[in-house]
């Protein structure tokens, strides 16, 4: 049985924004892209490093916390800083454990140098764990039947 890795399941090409970007512009990008979050990056092209994450919930909470209009805020003022990042080579179980420990449902996926590759969600990972458990149950069931046949 092959161990599933994040590289097998993540979505490449995560939607991104910059910390200095107007919050209203980021919100419009989320609507246009039909996504609930943006990865906030610094750097250019392949060397983009995640420095934050912005969810639709962060937008609402940030507006209320700062008592400011959506059009007066920047992404950097309401984003969650220091996001959990998941190495592309990490096993699925370890990725789920890391996400659970930080209390997040999504995380940017990075290469060994910390550059953004994409995003992974619990919805991407949990079906893979279910498949692995099913395969394990089948393997155990097959072994039990074989042992029973040998004894009989």
Image (cartoon, rainbow, N blue to C red):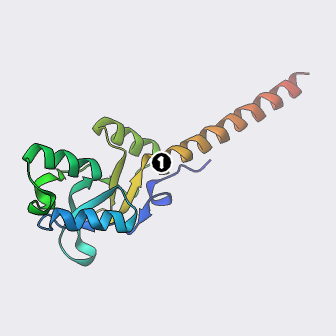
Whether residue 94 sits left or right of residue 20 in the image: it is right
Residue 150, position as x, y percentages in the image: 87, 27
Return the residue at label 1: 123
Residue 42 lies in quadrant: bottom left
Residue 87, position as x, y percentages in the image: 34, 55
Q: In the orientation shown, which residue stands out farthest toward the right? A: 152
Whether residue 58 sits left or right of residue 143 in the image: it is left
Whether residue 150 sits left or right of residue 28 in the image: it is right
Q: Which one is nearer the viewer's eye here, 31 or 79?
A: 31
Q: In the orientation shown, which residue stands out farthest toward the front? A: 69
**Whether residue 111 can be seen here:** no
Mark 1 Cα within 10 Å, few/some/many (few <14, many 20+)? few
Q: In the picture shown, does residue 31 fall above or below 62?
A: below
Q: Which one is nearer the viewer's eye here, 14 or 32?
A: 32
User: Residue shown at 8%/61% (left/top)?
Assistant: 72
Determine the secondary structure under disc 1.
helix
Q: In the orientation shown, which residue stands out farthest toward the bottom? A: 45
Residue 90, position as x, y percentages in the image: 40, 51
Residue 67, position as x, y percentages in the image: 8, 47
Image quarter hosting the C terminus = top right
Q: How many marks?
A: 1
Residue 102 lies in quadrant: top left
User: Residue shown at 27%/60% (left/top)?
Assistant: 39
User: Residue shown at 21%/68% (left/top)?
Assistant: 25
């Amino acid at each position: 049985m092959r161990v599933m890795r994040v590289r097998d399941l993540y979505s490449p090409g995560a939607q991104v924004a910059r910390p200095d970007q107007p919050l209203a512009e980021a919100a419009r990008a989320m609507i246009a892209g039909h996504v609930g979050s943006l990865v906030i990056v610094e750097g250019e092209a392949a060397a983009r490093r995640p420095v934050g994450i912005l969810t639709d919930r962060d937008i609402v909470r940030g507006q209320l916390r700062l008592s400011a209009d959506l059009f007066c805020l920047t992404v950097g003022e309401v984003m969650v800083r220091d996001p959990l990042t998941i190495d592309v080579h990490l096993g699925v179980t370890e990725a789920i454990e890391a996400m659970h420990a930080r209390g997040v449902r999504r995380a940017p996926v990075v290469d060994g140098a910390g550059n953004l590759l994409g995003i992974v969600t619990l919805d991407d990972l949990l079906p893979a764990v279910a498949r692995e458990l099913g395969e394990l149950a089948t393997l155990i069931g097959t072994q039990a039947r074989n042992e029973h046949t040998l004894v009989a």
